Amino acid sequence: MPDLPDGFVYRPEFLTISEEAELIAIIGALEFREFQMHGVTARRRVVQFGWHYSFNSFRLTPAPDMPAGFGAIRERAARLAAIEPDLFSEVLVTEYQPGAGIGWHRDAPPFGIVAGISLAGRCRMRFPVMIFMHSSIESCGRT
């Protein structure tokens, strides 16, 4: 494994196969919306819980509560990050269609530590040098 940025933790078997299937079933029942950033519709759909962060106004507004089915995964991610689960106050579920990706970016400032959990496929993350100073956790579910 190549050198990882400070604070980055990678756990390829973070989820069991059955946990991943349970999350996929929960997510399959969610109502997604188009994702827009700076007036452009991206090639992904999202649903947010806890907080909604607007990339147009850069403001937080309350969002619906996180589904109960995400609670155990949030607690496991918090243990891995050595923080209280409540500090993961927002859940952003993103659906990427085949071939859709995400360009260089920095996660929204209000959220501090970020845990990413990839389902139903592989994820590839590349970091420019400037992002190495940003603390994050990435846990790809099944690889």
Image: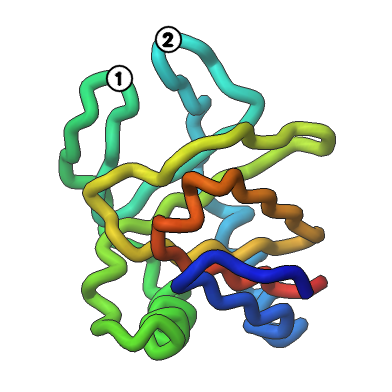
Q: Name the residue under label 1.
A: 56
Residue 45's x, y, as percent?
57, 34
**Number of residues whose C-alpha sits closer than 10 Å to that of mark 1, classed few (under 14), some (14–19) or many (20 or more):** few
Q: Quadrant of the N terminus?
A: bottom right
Q: Please identify the quarter of the rendering in which residue 42 is found.
A: top right
Q: Residue at x 18, y 39 (%)?
A: 60
Q: Where is residue 76 in the image (x, y as percent from the top left)?
A: 45, 87
Q: Which of 13 and 49 is in front in this view?
A: 13
The reply to whether discs 2 and 1 touch (Cβ–Cβ < 8 Å) is yes
Residue 135: name its quadrant: bottom left
Q: What element carries label 1?
A: loop
* 33, above or below 110, in the image: above
Mark closest to the chain's N terminus, 2 or 1: 2
Give coordinates of residue 8: x percent, y percent. Answer: 52, 71
Quadrant for the C terminus, please: bottom right
Q: Is residue 51 left or right of residue 16?
A: left
Decide which of 122, 93 is in the foreground and name it.
Answer: 122
In the displayed structure image, the side of residue 28 where residue 31 appears, left or right: left
> Is 83 positioned to the left or the right of 42 in the image?
left
Residue type beneath disc 2: Gly
Residue occupying image coordinates x 50% and y 12%: 40
Q: How far apart are the two marked residues, 2 and 1, measured between alpha carbons?
A: 8 Å
Residue drawn at point x = 45 percent, y = 80 percent: 77
What residue is drawn where x is 40% and y is 45%? 107
Residue 32 position in % (x across, y down): 51, 38
Pick the front one: 11 or 129? 129
Residue that extends furthest to the top in the rendered view of this protein: 39
Q: Name the residue under label 2.
A: 39
Looking at the picture, which amino acid does disc 1 mark?
Answer: Asn
